[in-house]
Image: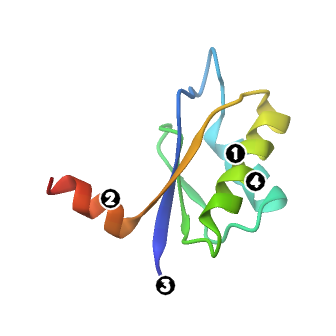
Amino acid sequence: MSRSVLLLRAVNVSGHNSVPMARLREVLAAETDLAEVSTYIASGNILCRTPRDPDAACAAVHAAIRVEFGVDTPVIHRTHAQLASSESA
């Protein structure tokens, strides 16, 4: 099983662009096909099993966040390998 991260740009847990992580996990479980979803602290980083179609997953997460929280934020997909290779660069 491969894991990925979906990075949200410019979100906070309070204040402007508020996206509470506990509610985000609930929304993603109900509104997307993502599996094994978790979040990393209050960072706006979503950990999940690597989706079959990363572009569709990003679009679904983007839409769910916009509907539920009123926040229009880019969603960027990175695999574990991509993150690991950027650490050594």
Foreground tag (1 vs 2): 2
Task: Name the residue that disc number 3 marks.
Answer: 1
Task: Name the residue that disc number 4 marks.
Answer: 60
Q: CA distance from mark 4 to mark 2?
A: 22 Å
Foreground tag (4 vs 3): 4
Query: In the image, what residue occupies the spot 69% across and 45% down?
Result: 24
Label disc, if present, on residue 24 of the rendered structure: 1
* Residues packed near mark 3 inside 10 Å, few (<14), some (14 to 19) or many (20 plus): few
Q: 71 or 52: nearer the eye?
A: 52
Q: CA distance from mark 3 to mark 2?
A: 16 Å
Q: Amino acid at mark 2?
A: Leu
The image quarter containing residue 52 is bottom right
Q: Is residue 16 above or below residue 69?
A: above
Q: Is residue 77 above or below residue 53?
A: above
Q: Amino acid at mark 4?
A: Ala
Q: Amino acid at mark 3?
A: Met
Foreground tag (4 vs 1): 4
Q: 56 or 11: nearer the eye?
A: 56
| Left or right, residue 78 beside residue 36 | left
Q: Secondary structure at mark 3?
A: loop
Q: Give the x, y percent position of residue 86.
A: 24, 54
Task: Name the residue that disc number 2 marks.
Answer: 83
Q: Give the x, y percent position of residue 38.
A: 57, 58
Looking at marks 1 and 2 on the same chain, the residue that comes earlier in the sequence is marked by 1
Q: Badges 4 and 2: C-beta atoms under 8 Å apart?
A: no
The image quarter containing residue 65 is top right
Q: Give the x, y percent position of residue 68.
A: 83, 37
Q: CA distance from mark 4 to mark 1?
A: 13 Å
| Left or right, residue 14 beside residue 89 | right
